[in-house]
Structure formats: C-alpha cells, structure tokens
Amino acid sequence: MKILLLGEYSRLHNSLKEGLQKLGHDVTILGFKDGFKDFTVDFPLEKKWNSGLLKKLKIVVLRLTGFDISSYLTYQQFKKNQKIFKDFDVVQLINENSFFCDFHYEKKILRFLFKHNKKIFLLSAGDDYPYVNYNFNHPENPSIVQPYLAGKIEDKNFSNVLKFRTNSFEKLHHFIYATIQGVIATDLDYHIPLQNHPKYLGLIPSPMNLDLFPKTEMEIKDKIIIFHGINRESYFKKGNDFFEKALDIIKEKYPDKVAIIVTENVPYKDYIKSYNQAHIVLDQLYGHDQGSNGLEAMAKGKVVFTNASELFEKHYNVTEKVAINGLPDVDYLVEQLSFLIENPNEIIAIGKRARLFIEKEHDYVKIAEKYLEVWQSAY
C-alpha cells in the first residue's frame, strides 16, 4: 500500500513507518519534526514567525485582525508540494491539529487531503478534543489536566491544551470525524475517552523499533545511576516538580550509592545517549500508560518511573512489575527509589521484565501488522 503519515510525536510515526516498510509498503511522512527533538521527516514543515520579534508582531496582528500569519505560512508550505500528497491508499493524522494551524487553514489543508486520497484515519496520541474535555469533566482521572487545575500551569503555558476547549477546535473535531474512517488510540489514556464512540477502532500500542535497541544486560558496578530528562515546556505536565524534590532527598539519603544525571531540552539523539548508562529513568507521573520516552527506556532494560497504573496492569495482564507506577507524591517516590537503591537485584529483575514486555506488546513489525489489519477492514 501507499501510505501517508501526517505529523510526528516522539518518533511514533517513524517507528510505524519502519515497521510498514519491513512489510513491503511505501510510506511517506509529512509534518513538523517535533520541536527540539528534531525527528526525521520526509517532507518537513517549519514553524515560522514562532519566536522573537516576529512572534510578538504575529500576536499583535492576530489580536487586531484575527489573521494568524504562522498558520498562513504553514499552509503555503503545504500548498507548494500538495500535488505530492495525492492518491494514497491510507492517510493517517497524528492529531486533530496535526499542522498546528488555526481552524481556517487547518481545514483547508485537510479538505485537500480528504478529497484526493482514499482512506483517512486519525490517531489519538496526544491532546485532542475528546481527551482534553474528558479530563476536565473527570478531574479525578490522572492526566495533565490535574497540575493545571492545581494552579501550577498558567493559561498561556497551557494554550496547546486549552485550545481544544474552544468553539473553533470543537468544529475542527467534528469536521475531521465526519470524514475519517475511524480513530485509533495509542495508549490507555486516549482509549478511555473514546470508548463506545462509533468511530473508535480500538487501541493499538505505540510501535517500538527494537532493531534500534539491541538487547543488553544491565550491570550495577558501583553507583546506581538515576536519569532525569526535563523538557521545560512540559515541566509540570510530566510531574518534574515532584521528581526534583524526591531527587533532592535521595541525594542526601544515599550520597555514596547514587549518581544523578539531569538534562534539559536537549535534542532527541543527545537525550538518548545521556540515559544509556542509567539504571533508573524518571519519565512522567500523570496517567495510566507509558509514553514513547518511557517505552524506549523500557526497551533498553531500564527501570522507569512512568504511568503504569492498575488499569494498565489489568489491560496487559501484567502480574509482575515491568515499570514503577509514578504518582505525584514526593514521599511515595522517595520510598520507591529507596527500595530500589537498597535492593539492586530488583533493578536488574524489573529491567529484564521491561524489555520482555516491550518485545511482546510494542514490537514495531507486529504493531504495523495491527495497523494494516485495521486500515484494510475499515470502510
């Protein structure tokens, strides 16, 4: 099949592309490179007027006229090559706002793609209308909405989430759902809001290209190494404030037993290199299921503090820990870290089970086969 994947989050579409290519399919990715992570994209788009003086000027023009220069420039980039993006058997959007445009220009791009290609599918792999609204309506559900409701995140720093509660993005949501063959959730957090929706095609776990992560045995020769990678844009969303407080306590409690590596806003390739030597990786706290960073660390046999709730364990029939379920509770995090530091054999055991779990549930070729099955059966 000829397949067009639109957008990139945390290497999800790159891994899927590699799995599909292994199965003999022709795959193209169009979209942004996911910010500083700088992932490979066949036809990269660039966010323009998005920093410095130009961004300030853009905001003034937007307020005065309602015209979004960045959206217009993204549309022009797409239009320049639009003839290339026709006649695909399958087009898959990574999000309801894959091009990060306002309603007017996002709809113009999507209308062209919907008109000139066969089957259209949507992923729920990040913030979107169903996910955001569900979590505002169910604040007890662990999600990125919780730190916002706790007053930790200002509206201006939560705009990429809050936009899905506006009328224009509600209209965009309905426009997309009126055309797509169906929507696929990439983990349990996105599965929950979509249950019983007539367009919901089910959960397909995120693909992991295990060829990029050769199986290795973790060794603890001297100190236990803890890695904490921070992305400032998602600092409170990931629970980094709790991780940092817990690490401060751990440093004092075990000065001779642990070494702590902290990185901040580094490119994906550098990020990966930085945690290769780690035994424990601190990933995220709000949710039920792991994101791509956590999955990659698990593929490398690390012990990952991430989303691994009881719902996750039930869904995957996990009877022994493959990750540590992170909670926004400093005392809990210190307790879990302390147990691992004092029982290094448990670090080795959990790391081995983590790798086996990824091999069983997230192998990129097996996942690509699941996508093909869903795409081909949907009408």
Image: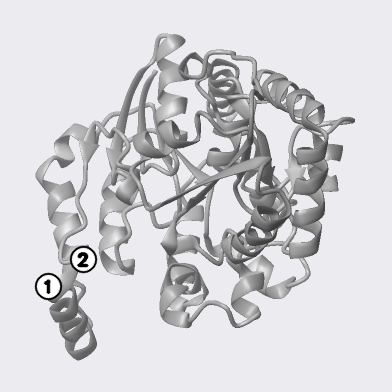
Q: Quadrant of residue 33?
A: top left
Report if residue 201 is visible in the image: no
Q: Percent position (x, y) of residue 104?
A: 28, 67
Q: What is the spatial separation of the Cα atoms under label 1 and label 2, in whole angstroms?
A: 7 Å
Residue 162 vertical position relative to residue 240 in the rendered view, above or below: below
- What residue did someone put label 1 on? 54
Residue 248 vertical position relative to residue 88 in the rendered view, above or below: below
* Residue at image location 33% in from the left, 35% down from the top: 117
Check contact, mark 1 vs mark 2: CB within 8 A. yes
What's the amino acid at mark 1? Leu
* Residue at image location 74% in from the left, 71% down from the top: 138
**Farthest residue, direction right:** 319
* Residue at image location 75% in from the left, 30% down from the top: 347
Q: Quadrant of residue 324?
A: top right
Q: In terms of depth relative to the viewer, which is nearer, 173 or 148?
A: 148
- What residue did someone put label 2 on? 50
Going by the image, does 114 lie left or right of 206? left
Q: Percent position (x, y) of residue 43?
A: 21, 36
**Farthest residue, direction front:** 256
